[in-house]
Amino acid sequence: MTSTGTPVVRRVRIPAGGAHFASAFALPLAGLPHRTAEEWARSTFEDTPALLRELLRTGWSGVLGLRLGPRSSARHVIGWRTVECGPELIALEARAPSLTVRNVVTLDGTRLLWATYATFARRGGRARWSLAAPVHHLVVPLLLGRAVRRTA
């Protein structure tokens, strides 16, 4: 917790589970209102200023080459296709010719875990992800922190 009582998002280790890259961030849920995994994902990605949403989409499609779906579709979260969804889990996926990226948000009652997995189909996928990973490690905790501040 910060001095203001806001939970701190921390990077945690997770197994790659067959992916070439895996990273995760944990958010303690104590004291926060109950939300489903989908509500957390939508709040984290979609309840951001329009300029930031456009920068995210531009990075995903421009730098990574990910093909995103329609923003307004109930089956997508800011263009990421929902491949699995339940109260405690949502898995979002986007593909490019050279890589597939999956964001998985899970709730276990005490914390939220935001895990990202990248699988490279071609050498270019690894190169593209190496450009995006440092930004990813800054942006995910920032966006989760914004989502917390809007719900607390």
Image (tube, helix red, strand yellow):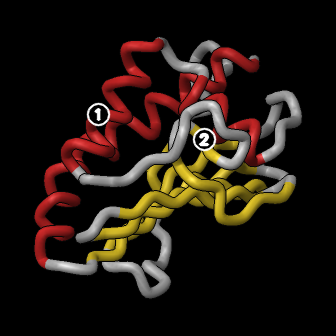
User: What residue is drawn where x is 62% and y is 45%?
Assistant: 76
Neighbourhood count class around disc 1 (C-alpha, 10 Å): few under 14, some 14–19, many 20 upward = some
x then y, percent, for residue 121: 26, 80
**Contact, CB < 8 Å: mark 1 with mark 2?**
no
| Left-right relation of 49 to 98 | right
Kindly state the secondary structure of the residue where label 1 is placed: helix
| Left-right relation of 6 to 39 | left
Work out whether 92 lies above or below 77.
below
Neighbourhood count class around disc 2 (C-alpha, 10 Å): few under 14, some 14–19, many 20 upward = many
In the rendered view of the protein, which quadrant contains the N terminus?
A: top right
x then y, percent, for residue 118: 36, 68
* Residue identified by numbered label 2: 77
x then y, percent, for residue 132: 23, 49
Looking at the rendered structure, the kind of residue marked 2 is: Val
x then y, percent, for residue 151: 74, 20
User: What residue is drawn where x is 70% and y is 56%?
Assistant: 90
Evaluate whether residue 23 shows in this view.
Answer: no
Looking at the rendered structure, the kind of residue marked 1 is: Thr
Mark 1–mark 2 Cα distance, whole angstroms, equals: 15 Å
Q: Nearer the viewer, residue 110 or 138?
A: 138
Dot 1 or dot 2, earlier in sequence: 1
Evaluate whether residue 131 shows in this view.
Answer: yes
The picture quadrant where one finds residue 7 is: top right
Kindly state the secondary structure of the residue where label 2 is placed: strand
User: What residue is drawn where x is 34% and y is 54%?
Assistant: 66
User: What residue is drawn where x is 62% and y is 25%?
Assistant: 147
In the rendered view of the protein, which quadrant contains the C terminus?
A: top right
* Residue identified by numbered label 1: 58
Work out whether 63 lies above or below 50.
below
